[in-house]
Amino acid sequence: MGKIIMLSMSQTKRHRLYAVLLILIPLLTVTLLFMIVGVAPFGPKNLLISDLSTQYLQFFAELRRQLLNLSFSSYSFLISIGDSLIPIYAYYLLSPLNLIVVFFSPAKLPIAIDLIIWAKMILCCISMSSFLTLKYRRYDFMAICGGLAYGLCGFVSMYFYDLMWLDALIILPMLVYGLEKLYNQNKMSLYVLCLAFTIVTNYYMGYVICGFCLIYMAYLIKKNQPQNVAFNKYMQTQWGRVGRFLWYSLISGMLAAVVLVPTAIAMMATGKKDIHLKNFLVKGTFGPSFTVNLGFGGNDFAGRLVHNPSLFTGSLFIIMGIAYFFSKRIKNRDKQASAVLLGSIFFGMWLLPLNTMWHMFQKPAGFPFRMVFLFSFALIMIAYEGYLKGIFADSRVVIWSAVSLGGAISIGYIWANLFSEKMRPFQFKTPQLFVHNFIYFLAMGFIILTTIAIISLTNRELSSKVILTGILTFELLMNFFVATMDAPFINQQRFERGYNQSEQAVKQVDRLNFTKDKFYRLLILDTPYRNIYPVPYSAYNDSLLFENHGISSYSSTLNSHTHSVLADLGFSSRNIRRIDMLGGSVIANHLLGIKYYYMIGKHTRRLSIRQNAAQLGFMTNNQIQHVQFHRNHVFDNLNRLVQAEAGNSRQYVIAPTVSRYSERMTRGVYHYKLQLRANTTGPHYLYLPKIRLYHVSMWVNGAKLSQTYSGLGTEMIPIGYLQKHQMTTVHLQSTKKLGSMPNVTAGVNLPAFERVVAQSKDHQFNMRAADDINEHGAHFRGTVNVDQQDRTLLMSFPYDKGWQLHVDGRPHRLIKVAGGLTGAQLTPGKHQLAFNYHIRGLLSGAIISAFGLVLLGISMVWRKHHR
């Protein structure tokens, strides 16, 4: 009896030690990784790279501001010309770990984000190790290795800065464990809670994991099939389990409906609602070169937008995964089930229609194969199961598995090199096929070392396990280092200095030029802040950082009306997710209330004030209700807009006469020269439809235009203020052919336009407490005077069915005007207006969630009485 008690105590101590190591080893490993890379607070650099610098930092700044103000606004005028915050919260900001941001100042916000990523990577490791321990009921050190391989897999190395996706990786192991308990024991609580939580924290990854749950259910069914029972007959006994799985999956979705329904409705106002048939063509998404990514260093930062699936999970687990299928110790039934699991994930990535459906029916705009972490999870689980069943005991199987892995990687490198060589004469090279050949030898080295360590592990010596863990950890760390080797990290202290200087500059002009009863937009070109970043920085979302009302935005949730209206008026647009402040005109300034342009240089600051700018809204002719813009016809759109405001058919945007035009090519460079005679007095502009300007240089009368106007999008370029009949020469130089050029310039009849603007000065929407709108963008009030002629109110924010208007205390219908902006038809007189943004779908989503909670309770009671 005493021996049994001592043995039990000894076992308890070992379990406690194992639990400590399960947490401590990932903690130390990820911390060491951050120290090696030099990431704050463990080093001098922050992780503001890729979308983390242009999107997520700004969204976290907004989250921090609202948390500290103890307010939640569902709408913000700091996002372009105004947009709903609901999809931004649902996609980017609902992780509980994001609450860390309240403890950091705006200048130190990158450190908070670094710590969130650090914590999530550690939790990924711990979650996977815990899953392997609970599923197989073994306290084996190899489970901790499995956690490391999962938390530092190829997906994490490539996409760690897309931190909103990492919560799904944390929850996935526990969700799968819950699914196994549902299948084997009819216990549903863990599965339901984990699936609902995954959907709530990031609906996109929740959707991806729902697809995986279907595959994993098929895996469980196949794995538990008796050896001598036909599948059709066996399935007759499984329909009850399938029904329970579908029922509790439905309940999980219902519990998340309070977030899911409003988000789905809001996303229907973005470009993400469009389905393109070309994304469903029956073809593969990658070729034989994908095997490069089975080895160390297959992907790097330069290829982050286009690359093969990041399959790397460490040579140890890939060798074990291959050995699982070679070993005679594994039953054929288990091999078949595992092949179904891995094959379904792989085929879902490779076949374009399935890949598109798994990415929520959209082609990823960069960062492809976002479900590849599921493959890593499944491979690690299967490999660990094989390890427990003794596949290491057969050295021949281990060696053949290692040789197979090395051969597959070699084929991938050969294919990549041959294909790249073949296409080089055509100057065609994609990151998907680009490889660093010296990495190949390092990958082979890791495979050889791992194989030797595995064979020595058959002796079951602790030292062998330590060596094997060391090799795996070093390989994972090096793979992460290679994946981030060329990443343009930023010095955190330099960021803090630059941010604080810019914040002071913006606050200074804000105090000088804004009043509490007027709303105007302020566009900022902050060169010193942009120069903090070692790569071109477009400042799309910086209005969220510095709290100025701009028009730029970059987000997967950008309102489609915002994008179409601004792009059709000449503002820079690269795709449906981006709109830039560059490309405006005197007409657009008036329409959108862009009164201030603030140029911040290294040693100088210059504030320009536009007198023609309206406020957030103004009264205009009823013709504005019928204005429709046409893509790539910017000058016609601007002219049509002013005509509608004035209520006449006069020409306000007039093309100059092209007196001379020449086109030639010299040494592969195209030269275009236009000699123009102005036909009106006012600002003149150049617009090249469908042309990205990054390869175009421009001169006006011999003076080169600023490179500020040579962005990645299509935009309108100011070429100067011209008097009527004034001659001017425009010279363009491009590395690509631009097409026909004579009809690409026009000027605004400024005297006539100013007379139109003067008519609206006494009929503008005067907002009350305009300085509070940053905290309460979903609710604002104001007054407007309406005359007999101009009875349509035009508000310069996108039309959204969530807006509700009360005029003099009574509900009033809002309409879409000017191609996508908000408007209302009013009667003459002075009116009190109240705008309130209603979260569409919130009530119905809450009702569905409440009903789901009731169904869950009923299901628990029913299950208790029918065991």
Image (cartoon, rainbow, N blue to C red):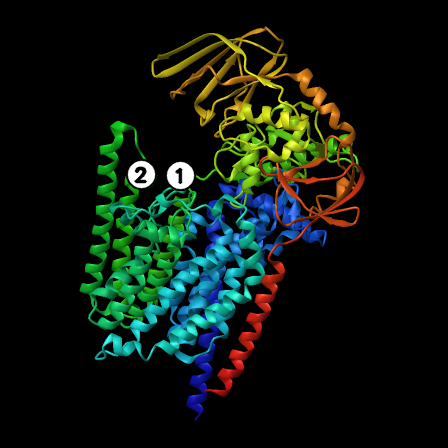
Q: Could you tell me residue 726's position as x and y percent?
A: 59, 6
Residue 302: numbered disc: 1
- 571 to 9, vertically: above or below: above
Q: Amino acid at mark 1?
A: Ala
Asked if the residue at tag 1 contacts the one at tag 2, i.e. Cβ–Cβ closer than 8 Å, the answer is yes
| Left or right: residue 341 compared with residue 360 | left
Q: Could you tell me residue 360's position as x and y percent?
A: 43, 53
Classed neighbour count for the residue bearing mark 2: other residues with Cα under 10 Å, few (<14), some (14–19), many (≥20): many
Count of marks overlaid on the render: 2
**Extreme bottom residue here?**
1
Quarter of the image where the N terminus is located = bottom left
Camera-side residue of 324 and 457? 324
Q: Earlier in the sequence, mark 2 or mark 1?
A: 1
Residue 532: numbered disc: none
What distance separates the C-alpha of mark 2 from that of mark 1?
A: 10 Å
- 657 to 338, vertically: above or below: above
| Left or right: residue 690 compared with residue 326 | right
Residue 434: numbered disc: 2
Camera-side residue of 94 and 738? 738
Camera-side residue of 820 and 789? 789
